[in-house]
Image (cartoon, helix red, strand yellow):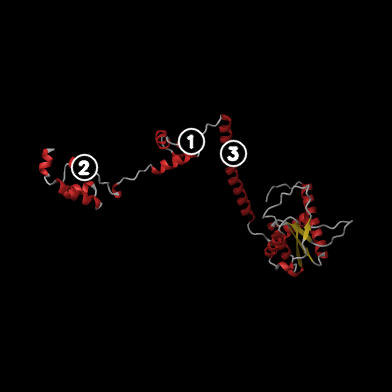
Amino acid sequence: MTEITNKYADFEGLRQQAVALRRAGLSRRQIRDHLHVDNNDLLNRLLEGEPAPEWTKRPNAKDDLRAKARELRLQGMTYDQIQVELGCSKSSISLWVRDLPKPERRDSSEQAKLAARKRWEHELAVRDVERQATKDAARAEVAALSDRELFLTGVALYWAEGTKDKPYDRREKAIFVNSDPDVIAVYLAWLELLGVPPEHVQYRVMIHMTADVEAAKRYWADFVGVDVTRLEKTTIKKHNPKTVRKNVGEDYRGCLVISVRQSAELYRRIEGWWSGIAAEAHARLKRGDRSGKV
């Protein structure tokens, strides 16, 4: 120590310089080179009590992992589960979370149920992806719809959802009722294809009394592109308290009834078109034409 003191006789003056340089943000190496201090013990004494500047501190690469491990531990995860989640060693996890309370132990049956539920959720997610892929592929197969394809589709759609004439109840008028906007869009495109004048098309909402009637009227009027005043008087369905309805909520807008004025002739043609389609289907079945080609 005597040798060091002799070499650097003015210790206090040297310390003042070292402290000033430290507070100016210099590193130990920079201070050592600036003051020509090549003895680490002396450099430690000169800088004693002076913190290192922030820029010289090495960032801890595991700080984020530590914070995440603590978060997962507080969620009730075990060391093994945290290790799987983060990919770090259990010894590190133990150091990071040892001050936190241990998660409550689950019995084996509860753990089995939890594992089974997670497997099922994963399976459902996979099925959803496959289901959507099938739908997307099928949609692409349709491509552009020809006038004849739309014509036949509209005939079948009407015969499934439209009103029919009965010997005991003559109804030779085209009236179509549905709650699905896509179905409504196809039907309206079909009427347009047939050349039905827009002014001959009448609209009416049919809805349960417990629903938001005015909101439903505005929705359907906007959907078909008419002013709400053009809608005919709404048909209100009375609620049966013994019936548990599932069509409730904000998305429930009732049904839209689409009537075509002076449509007796149109209805007769629809019935004839459908008879032609049905006759061809019977003929195909009779001759065994089941090629399976679409």
Looking at the image, residue 246 sits to the left or right of residue 103; the answer is: right
Please name which of the two marks, 3 or 1, marks the residue nearer to the observer.
1
Residue count near mark 1 (Cα–Cα under 10 Å), binned few <14, some 14–19, many ≥20:
some
Image marks 1 and 2: residues in contact by CB distance under 8 Å: no
Q: Which mark is residue 237?
A: none
Q: Residue beneath label 2, please?
A: 44
Image marks 3 and 1: residues in contact by CB distance under 8 Å: no
Q: Residue beneath label 3, please?
A: 120
Disc 3 residue type? Trp
Looking at the image, residue 105 sits to the left or right of residue 238; the answer is: left
**Which tag, 3 or 1, sits closer to the chain's start?**
1
Q: Secondary structure at mark 3?
A: helix
**Which tag, 3 or 2, sits closer to the chain's start?**
2
Q: Nearer the viewer, residue 239 or 179?
A: 239
* Distance between the alpha carbons at the discs numbered 1 and 2: 45 Å
Residue count near mark 2 (Cα–Cα under 10 Å), binned few <14, some 14–19, many ≥20:
few
User: Where residue 124 appears, x then y in whole percent?
Assistant: 60, 42
User: Residue at left 58%, top 46%?
Assistant: 129
In this rendering, the answer to whether 191 lies above or below 244 is below
Disc 1 residue type? Gln
Residue count near mark 3 (Cα–Cα under 10 Å), binned few <14, some 14–19, many ≥20:
few
Q: Which mark is residue 81?
A: 1
Q: Quadrant of residue 189?
A: bottom right
User: Where residue 289 appears, x then y in whole percent?
Assistant: 74, 48
* Distance between the alpha carbons at the discs numbered 3 and 2: 62 Å
User: Where residue 294 appears, x then y in whole percent?
Assistant: 67, 51
User: Residue at left 73%, top 68%?
Assistant: 229
Q: Secondary structure at mark 2?
A: helix
Q: Secondary structure at mark 1?
A: helix
